[in-house]
Amino acid sequence: MVRYVSRKRELMKIKQATIKDLPAIGNLWLEMAAEIVPDSYKPNVVWWKEIAERLMKSNVRYDIYYAVDRGMMIGFIDYMAFCEPATGKIHLTGQHFYVKPEYRKENIGKMLYLKFLKTAKRLRIEVVDLFCNPSDNQWKRIGYQPARMLMRKGI
């Protein structure tokens, strides 16, 4: 467990999630989905929790770190590590990254991201990929560049 002091928070902690944390993280995942998907789409949190649990139990490197402030879970980041034959390198791919709106602008997202990067360096990861909005300049400011386009079609 890593402890951080935020300007407005006396003591906030970053913890690595276990399977028992998935229900609470699932609630944050639903909050995140509500911000980014149309009202007509109903995200399936049960399915997400089942997938996350299977990944955590598998040989795949899948981790979730979450931020907690005074006993309340306020944000999370999850990622997977895999070998990419196209580059010949091990990639760490960020899947989801969320901080509750009332906790934004307090460096909590940055603290989660730094924990993510610290893990990448410890694992000797050479490439970090993120799924994010390419028009979001915060990622470009810290050195990320568009690498692929994600195509989507409803079925």
Image: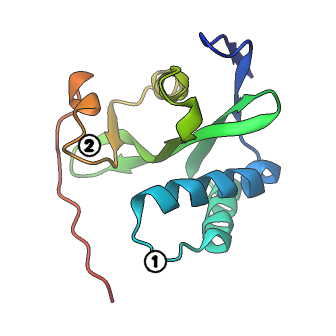
Q: Indicate left or right for 15 with 29 as reference.
A: right
Q: Quadrant of residue 26?
A: bottom right
Q: Would you place residue 111 above or below residue 53 in this image?
A: above
Q: Is residue 138 visible?
A: yes
Residue drawn at x 36%, y 41% as measured from the top left: 91
Q: Nearer the viewer, residue 87 or 11?
A: 11
Give, as a three-letter code, the residue at label 1: Tyr
Return the x and y of residue 43 as percentages of the image width and height.
54, 72
Return the x and y of residue 71 as percentages of the image width and height.
82, 33
Q: Would you place residue 155 above or below residue 94 in this image?
A: below
Q: Quadrant of residue 88?
A: top left
Disc 2 crowd rating (10 Å Cα; few below 14, some 14-19, many 20+) is few
Residue topped by disc 2: 88
Return the x and y of residue 89 as percentages of the image width and height.
30, 39
Instruction: Tell me the SS state at disc 1.
Output: loop
Return the x and y of residue 143 as percentages of the image width and height.
22, 24
Residue drawn at x 67%, y 64% as measured from the top left: 49
Q: Are marks 2 and 1 in contact (CB under 8 Å)?
A: no
Residue topped by disc 1: 41
Q: Would you place residue 144 above or below residue 154 in this image?
A: above
Name the image quarter holding the C terminus.
bottom left
Marks 2 and 1, how far apart at CA? 37 Å
Frontmost of labels 2 and 1 is 1
Residue drawn at x 28%, y 32% as measured from the top left: 139
Name the image quarter holding the N terminus.
top right
Instruction: Tell me the SS state at disc 2.
Output: loop
The structure's colour scheme is rainbow
Give, as a three-letter code, the residue at label 2: Gly
First in sequence: mark 2 or mark 1?
A: 1
